[in-house]
Image: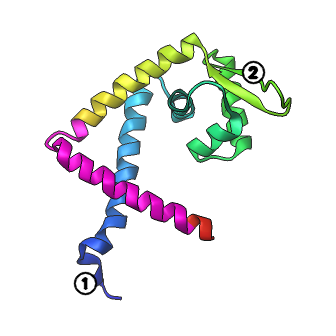
Amino acid sequence: MNNKDFTTPRRRVGFRLVGLSRRWRHLLDTRLAAAGLSDAVWAPLFHLSRLGDGISQSELAAAIGIDGSSLVRLLDMLVAQELVERQPHPTDRRIKLLNLTPKGRTTVQSIRKRLVVLEDELLVGLDDATLETLLSAFDVIDQRIAALHDQS
């Protein structure tokens, strides 16, 4: 394979997607950090809000993409800040269920407002039809990633 092979759309997509994702995340982290929200705070809160109260720590860890032991440390911090509370599972004492506190919900509202502003800035000039096409392409790629992941 030579450099010319990486000029076709099929060969450019992966590099562009990884680069865009990294830069988008960096910009998001910078904006949220300016509001006093570190990645360690906003990511678990956002995912917990998205998935809904009463999910297990392992479900949240999977959604964030980190291992359970790393999440325990983050949750300890979020509980200490009164943003999240742990509740025992009604039938399995080994499992802790997570809920946002009122303070956590207020923080998530602040995160969402900032996300909307950033998304509006980044997506200016792209109409809904273009965004739907982009999302459909993401869905296809996501399904292929899941299938390949299952094979390994």
Q: Which mark is residue 19?
A: none
Quadrant in which residue 40 is drawn: top right
Chosen colour scheme = rainbow
The amino acid sitting under disc 2 is Gln
User: Whole-percent x and y of residue 110?
Assistant: 41, 19
In reply to whether residue 144 is colored magenta, the answer given is: yes
Provide the major secondary structure of the magenta segment: helix
Q: Residues within 10 Å of mark 2 (few under 14, many from 20)?
A: some
Q: Which residue is the extreme one toward the front?
A: 91
Q: Which span is picked out in magenta?
A: 121-148
The amino acid sitting under disc 1 is Lys
Q: Which mark is residue 87?
A: 2
Quadrant in which residue 116 is drawn: top left
Q: Residues within 10 Å of mark 1 (few under 14, many from 20)?
A: few
Closer to the camera, 107 or 37?
A: 107
Q: Residue at x 68, y 38 (%)?
A: 71
User: Whole-percent x and y of residue 151?
Assistant: 61, 70
Of tags 1 and 2, the one toward the viewer is 2
Whether residue 13 is visible, yes or no, is yes
Quadrant in which residue 10 is drawn: bottom left
User: Whole-percent x and y of residue 132?
Assistant: 26, 47
Indicate the secondary structure of the residue bearing disc 2.
strand
In the displayed structure image, the side of residue 16 where residue 130 appears, left or right: left
Indicate the secondary structure of the residue bearing disc 1.
helix
User: Whole-percent x and y of residue 82?
Assistant: 64, 15
Q: Residue at x 48, y 26 (%)?
A: 37
Q: Residue at x 24, y 47 (%)?
A: 131
Give the residue at mark 1. Answer: 4
In reply to whether residue 150 is colored magenta, the answer given is: no
Q: Quadrant of the N terminus?
A: bottom left
Q: Which residue is the extreme one toward the left?
A: 125
